[in-house]
Amino acid sequence: MDKQELIKHVAEACDDKRAENIVALDMNEVSLVADYFLICHGSNERQVQAIARAVKETVEEKGLSIKRIEGFDQARWVLVDIGDIVCHVFHKEERYYYNLEKLWGDANQIPLHLGQER
């Protein structure tokens, strides 16, 4: 499975848990940290954890493994490291505070075409 296909599956998992403002960024030209970032947010801690859990389950169903998950217990900013893809699941307040989309403004956005755009 190629990386863009995996991003689509991860984005769909986020969408299924009603994540908001799901954005995928191509980091290849701007960062050595990861090839892609997927960024979304939930409105409360329980939803943030549900989104992160869905990402983990989706990746594992595809036969891949999660390298690391950070911030799950606090559920304010959960980082799910899938290797070349890093999924950032924010609590709504933290998302606007850290504003990764602006921080990495040079990165190209990848169209996701999700069924239930919010």
Image (cartoon, rainbow, N blue to C red):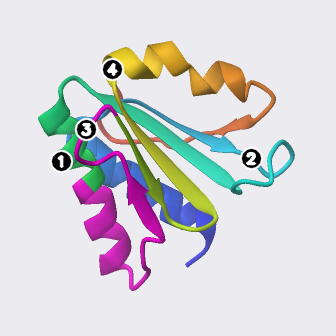
- The CA span between labels 4 and 3 is 13 Å
Question: Which residue reaches farthest left?
Answer: 46
- The CA span between labels 2 and 4 is 23 Å
- Residue bearing mark 4: 92
- Whether the magenta-drawn stretch holds residue 60 is answered as yes
Label placed on residue 50? 1
Label placed on residue 27? 2
- Residue bearing mark 3: 74
Q: Amino acid at mark 1?
A: Ala
- The CA span between labels 2 and 3 is 27 Å
Question: Which residue reaches farthest right?
Answer: 29
3 or 1: mark nearer the eye: 3
Q: Residue at x 41, y 34 (%)?
A: 40
Helix, strand or loop status at disc 3: loop
Task: Answer whether labels 2 and 4 touch (C-beta < 8 Å).
Answer: no
Q: Amino acid at mark 3?
A: Gln
State which tag comes first along the sequence, 2 or 4: 2
2 or 3: mark nearer the eye: 3
Q: Is residue 98 above or below residue 31?
A: above
Quarter of the image containing the N terminus? bottom right
Query: What crowding class fits label 3: few (fewer than 14 Cα within 10 Å), some (14-19), or many (20 or more)?
Result: few
Q: Is residue 78 above or below residue 106?
A: below
Task: Answer whether labels 3 and 1 touch (C-beta < 8 Å).
Answer: no
- Whether the magenta-drawn stretch holds residue 61 is answered as yes
Helix, strand or loop status at disc 4: helix
4 or 3: mark nearer the eye: 3
Helix, strand or loop status at disc 2: loop
Residue 86 visible in the displayed image:
yes
Residue 16 visible in the displayed image:
no
